[in-house]
Amino acid sequence: MNHFHGKTGCIFTEKAIKRNEHMPKSYWSWKLTFREGMAKIRTEFLEKGMVLGEEIHSQDGRSVMQSDLKLDEEKIELLHEVGKVYVEVKGVNEEEIDRLYQKGASEDDRKTINQLHTTQFSLCVDEDRYVQELKKISLRSLYIMRRL
Amino acid sequence: MSLDPPYKSADAVVTAVREIPSPYVPPDVLGQLLENMNSQIDQINALLRLDYATIIRIFAVANSVLHGNEEEVVKVNDAITNLGHGEIEKILDDARGEASFPNLPRKLFSLTAFWNHCVTVAVSAETIARFLHEKDTERYFLCGLLHDIGRLLMLTAMPRLYAISMLEGRYKVRSLQSQELRIFGYDHTEVGVEAIRYWNLPSFLEEPIEHHHSPTDSHQQVSLTVVTHLADAMAHALHLGQSGEIMMPKIYSHQIQELGIQPAHLHELAVETVTAVSPLLIRNYSSIDENQVR
């Protein structure tokens, strides 16, 4: 299945995808998820009450869902069926995306990630603001890569 | 097994390793570019400079007595021009398949992961240099690319002993650098700087390679050294590639701040680094491996 179909609401064109087709999927996720001002969320992390930020199209180009709709269970199910991995939602900041990634991880993944993260920073000074930022980046990377 | 290292000094390690192992296979397009006399030198540079082993060979030959350059060659483009396409092709041919690397447990060390780490630090250093409006960003790239070359030499020369030092470090939660000093009496930064001198590589590389874990000791190339230090930390945080070290190195915040980089800038630099480095990495490698967990 092509996860990047649709003419609108998709950051990268088919051409761009082909040009970088050797790129591991996890790095795409980094770009898609954390590019400033582009809140893209995997459909598996969608929650009731979120507001859709883009118009969703099916593979043949038909409009499936208008933007600005508040998501309920039925609409989330429909987005799953469309097969688009990333959708844009309004009003969700990066911390919220982090929370969704962490929520979507299994207990085993969470345990592994926490162990890796604790060990990685065990020689650093916790109060240092640079270390705090690097910790955030590291934890985010671990969750994204683990998920994909 | 005795823990007595066979090489008692950093320079002995450098002279013991005859070929630098690398997993990089130059793309076919590079051969085509080299055959075509009208090729843009920047295109050749962009492909050549990704591989630490190729860069070392090119600078070593360009700065050798045989080429008789009065001035040190410090730019990749100048080295390519100096050597000519034919010589570059010969260097690439010679490099193919010559260097062997010991088969270490993947959970301890992967040559592909090491290569990815080097490229990530190089790209991150160049990204930070651009952010700081530095003019010669290639120098930053090269410092990042070669910052851990001493570790690769130690691993190549003494694989079993180095693997033991890695294992012990992971169980006792020690940095790999402190393990190196404890077991070998010297560390990868000392081996790295000795190698730079032995191979006649550009001298601006010396301080950043010697002090990327101790930037306060840098006096001549402070910006290059601090940026290499931060780029290394960034690559560790992004988990793109692996140098063998699973600990985040000690962060020298004051030196980073003095360059004009604030903590809030790190996220932006991380995204820029990921975007730029992603197409360059050797695929099919995940640095997140549960085997790394103690």
Image (cartoon, coloured by chain):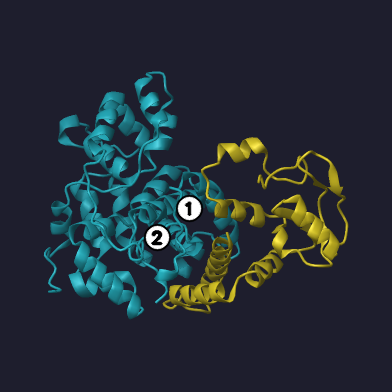
Q: Any idea which chain is the cyan one in this picture?
A: B
Q: Amino acid at mark 2?
A: Gln
Q: CA distance from mark 2 to mark 1?
A: 14 Å
Q: Secondary structure at mark 2?
A: loop
Which residue bears the numbered disc 2?
Answer: B242
The x and y percentages for residue A68 are 87, 55
* Viewer-nearest residue: A89 or B84: A89
The x and y percentages for residue B188 are 26, 62
Q: Any idea which chain is the yellow one in this picture?
A: A
Identify the residue at image location x=18%, y=49%: B198
Residue B249 in view in this figure? no
Placement of A34 over or under B291, stated as above or below: above
Specify whether disc 2 shares its chain with disc 1: yes
The x and y percentages for residue A106 are 59, 72
Looking at the rendered image, the quarter that the C terminus of chain A falls into is bottom right
Image position of B133 (left or right of B93): right
Of all chains, the one bearing label 1 is B
Which of the 4 image quarters holds residue B111? bottom left
Identify the residue at image location x=44%, y=78%: A122
The x and y percentages for residue B189 are 28, 61
Q: Amino acid at mark 1?
A: Ser
How many numbered dots are placed on residues in this image?
Answer: 2
Q: Secondary structure at mark 1?
A: helix
Residue B33 in view in this figure? yes
* Viewer-nearest residue: B225 or B57: B57
Which residue bears the numbered disc 1?
Answer: B124
Crowding around mark 2 (Cα neighbors within 10 Å: few <14, some 14 to 19, many 20+) is: many
